[in-house]
Image (cartoon, helix red, strand yellow):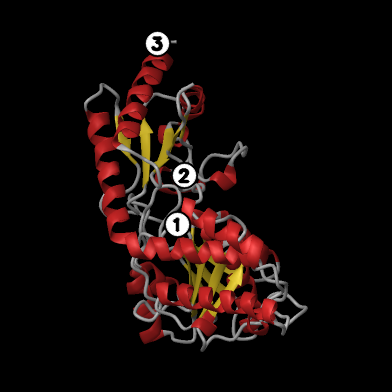
Amino acid sequence: MSETVYLDHAATTPMHPEVIEIMTEAMKRNFGNASSIHQIGRESRGLVEEARRTFAESIHAKPQEIVITSGGTESDNIAILKTAEKYKDKGKHIITTVVEHPAVLKPMAYLNETGFDITYLPVNEDGEVTVEQVKEALREETILVSIMYGNNEIGSLMPIKAVGQYLKETAPEVVFHTDAVQAYGTEDIDVRDENIDLLSVSAHKINGPKGIGFLYINEDISIPRLIMGGEQENNKRAGTENIPGIAGFKKAVELRMTNKTDLRDSYSYFKKLFINKLEETDIDFSVNGSMERSLPHILSIHLKGVPSDKLLIHLDLARIAVSTGSACSAGNVDPSHVLIALYDKGHPAIEETIRVSFGLGVTEEAIIKTVEKIQDACTFLKGS
């Protein structure tokens, strides 16, 4: 049986072998509770604080500004809901975009039901918003702006630095949050330079373990404690620490930060190669969003006249894993909200788009094989 070609790294990534090794060792040796005062507990505490420093350095933050969470969804929920809880007396207006991940959109919908006014910024044909849109949407009662760093379906990059600079200069009291789950590990993120107040990250997008992530909280921002109980995470999030997960996350971050430039170049090459190989076929296609202003590992393609659900079945039978969009929407019959934001309902691209995303283990041969199988499937589906 042929080996599976995995091109769905935007959904999740395989753990790096060195991450697995570190976690296995931590399971054997670092079983102590990091809150215990004996030596075994202190060893676990030391591991947690070393990891916190690594996470902080990766985004140019301070260790005390890092709160370790269970992943991107929790980090997004905390950032949005706790900011709203803290600053609701100052105002109940929040700005976000129509193309956010459900981990942002669902808390926004909840807040809307409880009396908050949410402004959803539309995107242009490349899936981007502008600083001018934020400027026009701001009100005296605005308390939070939440804009993702890079989109998880089409890869579009948002003008985070420009928005952060504008907010700092004109509305410094407004909290600025970015969901950086897809961008972290490929983009150069500097929370100080970009004037970011809250930032969400997940380990499983960078070849780390599932169930672990972090939320950066600027030391000048005060939000209520996240989970009540013990005094873990600087008294912000109670619960006994997941030591193996934290150790694995730390290793994944170290590997990414060391190899980030090479990885970015590699993914950009794969993206261009994929397009070049498609152009050598007779497939009628177009790219959703921008090739240039986008995350290097995500490519969204409209294969014209080919239903994506049927195409995915053919590719799956050929042991090729791609997707139609966000993994968090799998099984949902509703069309992609991101593609609707680009094209409006009824556009063929909404039902004829696949997302390929690159990462650990992807090769030129895998790209070429995938395009060949797409060609075969398109030929079959158009002829049936």
Q: Position of residue 172 (x, y in %)?
A: 44, 86
Give the crowd class for mark 3: few <14, some 14-19, many >=20 residues within 10 Å: few
Q: Are marks 3 and 2 in contact (CB under 8 Å)?
A: no
The residue type indicated by label 2 comes to: Ile
Q: Position of residue 191 (x, y in %)?
A: 40, 77
Q: Quadrant of residue 92?
A: bottom right
Q: Nearer the viewer, residue 33 or 63?
A: 33
Q: Which mark is residue 182?
A: 1
Q: Are marks 1 and 3 in contact (CB under 8 Å)?
A: no
Q: Nearer the viewer, residue 141 or 262?
A: 262
Q: Is residue 50 visible?
A: yes
N-terminal of the two: label 1 or label 3?
1
The residue type indicated by label 1 comes to: Gln
The residue type indicated by label 3 comes to: Gly
Q: Which residue is mark 3?
A: 383
Left or right: residue 36 compared with residue 86: right
Q: Nearer the viewer, residue 33 or 98?
A: 33
The residue at 69%/67% (across/down) is 31
Q: Which residue is mark 2?
A: 340
Mark nearest the camera among 1 and 3 is 1
Q: Which mark is residue 190?
A: none
